[in-house]
Image (spheres, rainbow, N blue to C red):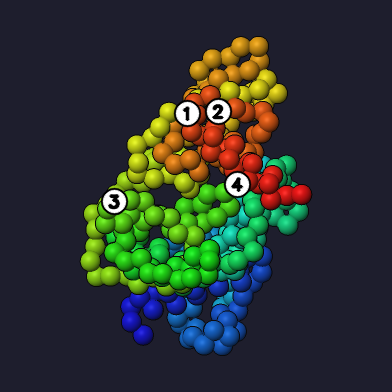
Amino acid sequence: MNMKQAGIKKIQRFLYLLYRMDGRSINLADEARNLGFTVRTLQRDINELDSAGFPVCNNLPGEYTLVEGFSFNKLSLSAQDEALLNLMGQLADTMGENWLTSYQHLRSRTVRPEGKSAYFIKMPRMWHSINQQMLEAAETAILKKQYINLQYRRANRKTWWCNHLRPLIIALFDGFWYLVCLNDSNGYMKFSLTKILQILPQKETFKPTAIHSLLQKEPNIWFDEKPTQPIELEISAEAAPYFKEVEFFPHQQIKKEEKGKIILSCRANNPMQVLPQLKRWLPHIRVIKPKTLQQQLNDELRAYLKERP
């Protein structure tokens, strides 16, 4: 067993001992037989936990517990803390069984069984789980800044290889997880994690590329490297209050307001950054400029209506 494996085994023993001592006494000889280690090894583990600040109590020879009144299950959380945990749970659910299991273990150790939250957070439910090996390969390549070759399944079920990519980040947009990369032309490419078939890391590495500030400005995954174009929209009086509270479009700003209606501006470099929201807010929204965007919206709506009886 190498040092890394030994370290992992030691951490696993620490976690196991803390779990077993939470609210009960343990006998080191019994635990040693269960785990397949010597009593001396577990005694060293107990001493290290005690030195690290965990309130270990030795009531009888060879028996240990956590001091009375201390319990991982009795940690006090505010309503906001629990709401954040709920959000973490919804995100973990989209990442697959391993993440969900880790979350459930974390929650069981931090929230009392009788604890309730005043908050409810709803995330879109994913029907396809993410391949954990693929997720780990993507994460490793991002952290090590390694170029990757990637095999992907398109919407038409055909597969293709995309080579020499710089993986930048794993991002969540609208309930979907994406691997965001740069190609050799410095163009952004976004791959749904559920459709990635293979990730092959390369020995070649790349220099860090800032991405967080860009993602914070974008309301959806449809951003790219092209210059943004100005857009002007008219919002009805009925819908105006919502646009005063939430940013639905990239770089959204209210230009003026009259008789309850508002005129707002935004900027986009891809029509798909705004078209889904335009359709969502019909009939309470109208494109003032550019006319080409309004024409594209009209064409798509006509095509939709033509296909329906």
**Measured along the vertical axis of the image, is residue 99 above or below residue 212?**
below
209, above or below 154, in the image: above
Q: Quadrant of residue 22?
A: bottom right
Describe residue 184's horizontal placement relative to residue 136 as left or right: left
Task: Look at mark 3 in the image and give the residue it sits on.
Answer: 186
Classify 299 as above or below 113: above
Task: State if disc 3 and disc 4 touch (CB < 8 Å).
Answer: no
The residue positioned 57% from the left and 49% from the top of the image is 174
For disc 2, the marked residue is: 287
Give the mark nearer the N terminus: 1 vs 3.
3
Q: Amino acid at mark 4?
A: Leu
Question: Which residue bears the numbered disc 1?
Answer: 290
Q: Nearer the viewer, residue 174 or 55?
A: 174
Q: CA distance from mark 2 to mark 4?
A: 37 Å
Residue at 49%, 26% in the rendered image: 289
* Residue type at numbered disc 3: Asn
As helix, strand or loop, the secondary structure at mark 4 comes to helix
Spatial CA span between label 1 and label 2:
7 Å
The answer to whether residue 92 is above or below residue 219 is below
Who comes first in sequence, dot 3 or dot 2? 3
**Which comes before the other along the chain, label 4 or label 3?**
4
Residue ID for mark 4? 84
Q: Residues within 10 Å of mark 3 (few under 14, many from 20)?
A: few
Give residue 38's position: percent from left, percent from top: 48, 86
Name the side, left or right, on which 291 lies relative to 149: right
Question: Mark 3 and mark 1 in contact (Cβ < 8 Å)?
Answer: no
- Toward which corner of the image does residue 41 lie, by quadrant? bottom left
Residue 74 seen by the camera = no
**Spatial distance from mark 4 to mark 3, Cα to Cα?**
36 Å
Q: Please give left or right for residue 268 compared with residue 86 in the image.
A: left
